[in-house]
Image: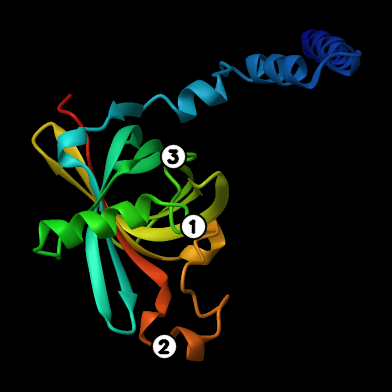
Amino acid sequence: MSCALKKVEYTLDSVTIWRFLMRPTRPLTLLAYALTVLGFSVVSVSQSAHADVRKLEIDKEKSVVQWLGKKVSGQHNGTLNIKSGTVSLDGEQIVGGSFVLDMNTIANEDIESPKWKAKLEEHLKSNDFFNIAKFPEGTFEITKSEPGEQPSDVLLTGKLTVKGLTFPITFPAKVTKTGDSYEASGKVTLDRTKWEIKYNSGKWYDPAQLGDKLIYDDIEIEVRVATKQM
């Protein structure tokens, strides 16, 4: 008899729970109750997923963009300063970041003559190239990161904005830790014509007419970003 009574009590309790679960309610409330019945507690997914993410400010003095442009008759290389930025890290892995590029700091490093060095820099800042009077800043925002083969490797995808035009770019990077700061470095090749930098481009002008004044469209970029000590 006692066994029968226990069975009835269990059946009634199950019916009560079933009716409660089937009542109109929001999915999250239903899930929370179900987990509570099973003895679990509900934890915020967003909080648990991002609990370890740290946003670190970059060290401008140790961060730089290096560039290399080539033409038929030779090549030039130089630097571009990063005005500001932050890097988001989950453990030792980059998961986000945003940076502001100071286009007015475009500088040449290979020309020894101060006169010709200044002339090239002025030309790069003109309407023929980056038009910094109208577009004094560029930006890069990391939108996706994927782990690489090694713990220090990461494949970054982001949006690069130059001259008011935004296009996605993807490149591999490496992250290292020195003391309390991090350094990330990576290389990428960009087609300058995407950002309307068409000066002496073989895509837009007759290469035969340009002759040795032809400038190749690809620009090789190397980025080094260091964070401030925590």
Residue at 36% in and 40% down? 101
Q: Position of residue 134 (x, y in %)?
A: 49, 39
Q: Tell me which label, 3 or 1, sits earlier in the chain.
A: 3
**Is residue 91 in view from this perspective?**
no
User: Which element type, helix, strand or loop, lies under badge 3?
Assistant: loop
Residue at 91% in and 14% down? 24
**Is residue 184 in view from this perspective?**
yes
Disc 2 from disc 3: Cα separation: 30 Å
Per the rendering, the mark at residue 133 is 3
Q: Residues within 10 Å of mark 1 (few under 14, many from 20)?
A: some
- Residue type, numbered disc 2: Gly
- The residue that mark 1 highlights is 169
Disc 3 from disc 1: Cα separation: 25 Å
Q: Looking at the picture, does residue 188 appear above or below residue 209?
A: above
Could you tell me if the residues under marks 2 and 3 are in contact, i.e. CB atoms within 8 Å?
A: no
Residue at 55% in and 59% down? 196
- Residue type, numbered disc 3: Ala
- The residue that mark 2 highlights is 211
Front of the two marks 1 and 2? 2
Q: Looking at the picture, does residue 219 appear above or below residue 52?
A: below
Q: Is residue 56 left or right of residue 112?
A: right
- Residue type, numbered disc 1: Ile
Q: Is residue 91 left or right of residue 139?
A: left
Q: Residues within 10 Å of mark 2 (few under 14, many from 20)?
A: few
Front of the two marks 3 and 1? 3
Q: Tell me which label, 2 or 3, sits earlier in the chain.
A: 3
Q: Position of residue 230 (x, y in %)?
A: 17, 24
Of residues 113 and 173, the one drawn nearer to the viewer in this rendering: 113
Q: Is residue 105 left or right of residue 141?
A: left
Of residues 129 and 180, the one drawn nearer to the viewer in this rendering: 129
Q: Looking at the picture, does residue 192 appear above or below residue 48?
A: below
